[in-house]
Image: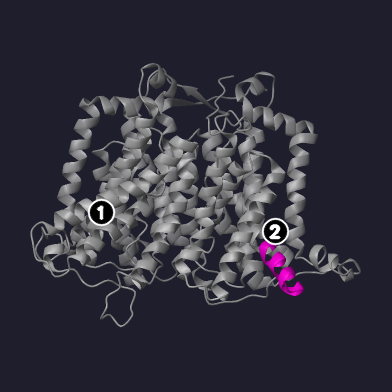
């Protein structure tokens, strides 16, 4: 028989060990899957392409950082909301809306070359995401409608809205009816921080934001409020914390950051608004937030890990013609194992013989 | 209105709403036992894929539907194991299940995107379907449509007319008390989760075996999430699921017909309707309840149960 005995105190060793265990189990499962599906390719070379090559090749490494930036920014916002027990599952929708809003500003001032353009687009992107998440906050507070369902439904709406915009007002007038916007001018594009790659300033912004959030949560009353609202809602009420404020802040922060990431993607690697803007970052960022245990600085590292699986997944697709959906399977598995291994923190696993 | 158009609309609505009925009635039982499984979308897509794959290999609709149910159960069992034995957070685990299911189905189904299958077609019931008006309206549907309605009845009967149903509801409302008087909380919940998986699987298979004869990545297009909304809309009462699902079916059909009638609105805006309607309906439900708290919510919904004895 196996039995779980609650620990008196959370095990610090397990806090560190359980993610490693989860990683090991994921790698092991990945190995088994490859052994099963690969016929004439050695598993080790696929593993190398998947997990090592993106780290040692400078181009792939820059692409890894390009993909990590939006995951960091969105994951950071989600981690703050999740702490408070506010489940914004539709960051993908807010990301798309931020991308549309910011790009619309950029395209409106298409002929303008000015320093203020990019900041203005950024503000529009943040506001777009904020307003979109704000709908969910309003409905939850006013009508107690579950924010999980609202944010998700609005994600489907946002993707359709993007497509409508690209076939209508934001379409490139001289683009042969392709559903794409015009390509942004230089002053509407994010500065590149690594010459010769697509790596843009978004990465630096992400790191700064995460440090700010870490400091804010530690030192500011609001950090305390969201922590307690999430872990002990009744205590939060007795402490006089305003429930509605927690809902508003959580959704506006996570929505605004998702919107920022959307604008960065459009004004960064894409350089225009295309139907390819939604890349599942909003959903993957949920995994990023959980892998980081909702820690604002941890998000930086878990985003790098998930970005590795993205870039590696693309590489095996190109080199070995394996489907890129394998990335999603790994990410799902990693989250499964991670959640499962966390039981070791709060409980002791005890084996004992049954009497008889 | 033209009579055959009317009947076509009724059939259209039934076909659009049945996947939602299956998925929602399964989830309703799960939530009644106190478990929130957000993996409906993932279980549906796996059901859609397995149903399609088995159909294309065996051409046997019974086998196809059965394997879809089994597929849904297998993937639901991951959720059951994690949440019931390893006590993981149900929201996070359900999300992981959806992400994993979508990835798995896209991966495993990559060889089937070009294929088509023979759809499971309607089977008019002999003699009864010949009755004027009533025949085509009541007795000429796809067998799975009848099954969906029967499952709603079955869940209602189980929950409110059997002893086990009473126990299941008690567990959903207060798992500690139910455990104290000797009921096996985990066993009931695991059973409920597996049933939910089977129903989501069959709902997904309906999409790829009855609605369209093809398989496509992400073909569930959020129906699993709409089903979750339906459970809330139905206030956890089985028969209200039918009402809600027909409402959604109606909106979907309206959208398709509006496109056919060349109404001057972009297709994208019409396609938003089912998603927006979900939100509007959830809001209107709350407006009807005003400030009363919803008493039908299972008290222990989403809470982790761990017994030390």
Taking A124 as reference, is B261 left or right? right
* Label 2 Cα neighbours within 10 Å, binned few <14 / some 14-19 / many ≥20: some
Residue range highlighted in magenta:
B1-14
Residue A305 can be seen, yes or no? no
Which one is closest to the eye, mark 2 or mark 1? 1
Taking A91 as reference, is A262 left or right? left
Q: Is disc 2 placed on a helix, strand or loop?
A: helix
Residue sitting farthest toward the right: B127
Q: Which residue is mark 1?
A: A125
Labels in figure, total: 2
At 42% from the left edge and 30% from the top edge, which residue is drawn?
A: A344
Q: Which residue is mark 2?
A: B66
* Label 1 Cα neighbours within 10 Å, binned few <14 / some 14-19 / many ≥20: many
Q: Position of residue B191 (x, y in %)?
A: 66, 40
The chain to which mark 2 is attached is B
Relative height, residue A44 to residue B3 (above, below): above
Q: How is the image coloured?
A: one colour
Which secondary structure class fits the magenta region best? helix
Taking B148 as reference, is B306 left or right? left
Q: Is residue B6 magenta?
A: yes
**CA gap, disc 2 to disc 1?**
47 Å
């Amino acid at each position: 028989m196996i039995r779980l005995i609650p620990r008196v105190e959370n095990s610090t060793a397990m806090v560190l060990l359980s993610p490693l265990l989860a990683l090991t189990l994921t790698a092991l499962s990945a190995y088994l899957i490859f052994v099963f599906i690969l016929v004439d390719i050695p598993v080790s070379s696929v593993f190398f392409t998947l997990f090592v090559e993106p780290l040692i090749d400078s181009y792939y490494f820059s692409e890894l950082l390009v993909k990590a930036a939006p995951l960091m920014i969105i994951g950071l916002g989600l981690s703050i909301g999740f702490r408070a027990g506010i489940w914004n599952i539709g960051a993908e929708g807010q990301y798309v809306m931020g991308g549309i809003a910011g790009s619309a500003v950029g395209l409106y001032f298409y002929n303008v070359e000015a320093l203020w353009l990019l900041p203005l687009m950024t503000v529009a992107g943040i506001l777009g995401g904020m307003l979109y998440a704000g709908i969910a906050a309003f409905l939850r507070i006013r009508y107690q409608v579950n924010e999980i369902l609202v944010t998700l439904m609005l994600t489907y709406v946002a993707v359709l809205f993007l497509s409508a915009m690209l076939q209508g007002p934001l379409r490139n007038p001289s683009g042969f009816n392709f559903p794409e916007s015009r390509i942004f001018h230089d002053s509407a594009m994010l500065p590149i921080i690594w010459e010769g790659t697509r790596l843009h300033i978004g990465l630096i912004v992400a790191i700064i934001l995460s440090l700010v959030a870490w400091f804010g949560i530690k030192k500011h009353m609001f950090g305390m409020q969201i922590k307690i609202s999430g872990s002990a809602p009744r205590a939060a009420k007795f402490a006089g914390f305003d429930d509605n404020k927690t809902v508003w802040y959580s959704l506006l922060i996570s929505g605004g950051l998702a919107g920022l990431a959307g604008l960065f993607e459009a004004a960064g690697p894409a350089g225009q608004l295309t139907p390819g803007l939604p890349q599942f970052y909003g959903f993957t960022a949920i995994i990023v937030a959980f892998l980081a245990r909702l820690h604002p600085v941890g998000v930086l590292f878990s985003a790098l890990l998930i970005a590795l699986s993205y870039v590696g997944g693309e590489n095996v697709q190109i080199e070995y013609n394996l489907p890129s959906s394998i990335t999603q399977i790994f990410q799902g598995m990693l989250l499964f194992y991670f959640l499962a291994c966390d039981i070791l923190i709060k409980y002791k696993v005890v084996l004992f013989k049954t009497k008889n | 209105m033209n009579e055959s158009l009317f009947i076509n609309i009724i059939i259209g609505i039934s076909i659009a709403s049945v996947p939602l009925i299956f998925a929602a009635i399964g989830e309703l039982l799960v939530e009644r036992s106190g478990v929130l499984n957000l993996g409906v979308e993932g279980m549906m897509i796996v059901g859609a894929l397995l149903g399609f794959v088995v159909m294309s290999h065996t051409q046997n609709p019974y086998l196809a539907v059965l394997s879809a149910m089994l597929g849904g159960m297998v993937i639901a069992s991951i959720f059951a194991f994690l949440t019931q034995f390893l006590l993981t957070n149900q929201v996070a685990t359900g999300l992981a299940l959806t992400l994993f299911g979508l990835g798995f189905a896209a991966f495993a189904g990559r060889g089937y995107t070009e294929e088509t299958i023979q759809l499971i077609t309607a089977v008019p019931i002999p003699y009864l379907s010949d009755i004027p008006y009533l025949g085509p309206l009541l007795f000429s549907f796809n067998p799975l449509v009848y099954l969906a309605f029967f499952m709603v009845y079955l869940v209602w009967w189980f929950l409110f007319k059997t002893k086990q149903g009473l126990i299941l509801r008690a567990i959903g409302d207060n798992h500690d008390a139910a455990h104290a008087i000797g009921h096996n909380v985990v066993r009931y919940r695991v059973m409920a989760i597996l049933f939910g998986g089977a129903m989501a699987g069959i709902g997904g298979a309906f999409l790829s075996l009855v609605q369209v004869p093809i398989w496509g990545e992400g073909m569930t297009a959020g129906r699993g999430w709409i089903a979750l909304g339906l459970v809330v809309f139905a206030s956890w009462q089985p028969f209200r699921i039918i009402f809600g699902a027909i409402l959604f079916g109606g909106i979907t059909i309206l959208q398709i017909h509006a496109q056919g009638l060349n109404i001057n609105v972009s297709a994208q805006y019409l396609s938003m309707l089912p998603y927006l309607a979900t939100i509007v309906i959830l809001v209107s439900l709350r407006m009807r309840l005003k400030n009363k708290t919803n008493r039908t919510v299972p008290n222990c919904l989403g809470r982790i149960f761990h017994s030390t004895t």
